Image (cartoon, helix red, strand yellow):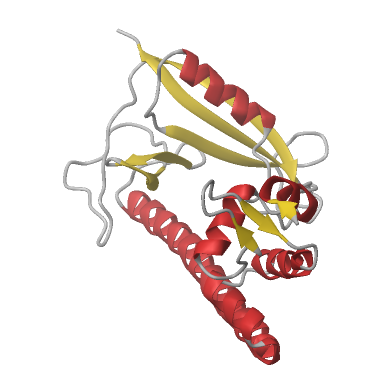
Amino acid sequence: MITIGEFALSSGVSVKALRFYDERGLLTPAEVDPDSGYRRYRAAQMRTATTIRILRTAGLSVEDVKTALEEPDRLADLLQGHAAELAGRRDLEDRAMKHAAEAAEGQLEQLAAALAEAGVTITGSFWAGLEPAGSSPAVIDQRLALPVEGEVPSSFSVPGLRIETGVLPRREEAYVELTMADDWPDLLEGAPGGPLPPDQLITLTEMLEERGIERAEIRQRATELDGEGHPEDADQDALYSMEAAVTVAVLD
């Protein structure tokens, strides 16, 4: 018989997970000491533990894994159903992302056209402001802004958009500049959590924490570059320079 600690080391399933699987009926210990509650396993149960790891890594729910263990002939159908669910979810996410990007681009075009009609000159490229919304760290407010010359008429409005105008105050900013390409390698491609954040953004976040700045708007501006660092029209080999800035102090 194998103790739960030895079984965990050998199988790659943590002690916590083994206890959870026991509670859910996926992998019941061969023996439980009635006095101490210590769990012990048989060597043959290593195969079951391995199967559980594979199916859980594939994304199957605990209930589906339990079904697969109890009714092996249903495994193919369970995997096929899970694959179809993943494909549908990915398609929905892709369509949502495309819609969001098109909506933002359309709103900027709409705003730029309305400013031109009102005789207001746009003096630079747009920037996006990102900041936490309310008390939830998982929800972000996005602000799309265009720099203009002079004042915007008080009557200025664009149907469907909430317009804010004003002059940014003199301020001290912390910022980082990143240069990247469309084919930049992602060393964690396919891993949970997405790609690694750029080291420059990590450094900026560390600085904000040191200064006690927890909730701040991050302004982002991207510029397309050619091989020598000059703006040019889009092409597959173009590099992108992104500036991320945070206001750390408003000056008098």
Q: How many marks?
A: 0
Q: Quadrant of residue 91?
A: bottom right
Measured as percent of width and height from the top left, residue 182 is found at: 75, 51
The residue at 36%/39% (across/down) is 132
What is the residue that sits farthest to the front in this orientation?
A: 35
Image quadrant for the N terminus? bottom right
> Closest to the observer: 45 or 146?
45
The residue at 68%/64% (across/down) is 57
> Closest to the observer: 147 or 135?
135
Indicate whether 175 appears above or below 164: above
Quick check: can you spot residue 185?
yes
Horizontal side of 102 relative to 50 (left or right) equals: left
Image quadrant for the C terminus? top left
> Closest to the observer: 40 or 191?
40
Indicate whether 210 appears above or below 109: above
Measured as percent of width and height from the top left, residue 163 is found at: 26, 47
Indicate whether 244 appears above or below 40: above
> Closest to the observer: 242 or 151?
242
The residue at 73%/67% (across/down) is 54
What is the residue that sits farthest to the top in this orientation?
A: 252
The residue at 32%/31% (across/down) is 150
Measured as percent of width and height from the top left, residue 211 is found at: 44, 13
Quick check: can you spot residue 235?
no
Q: Quadrant of residue 197?
A: top right
Measured as percent of width and height from the top left, residue 103 is found at: 43, 63
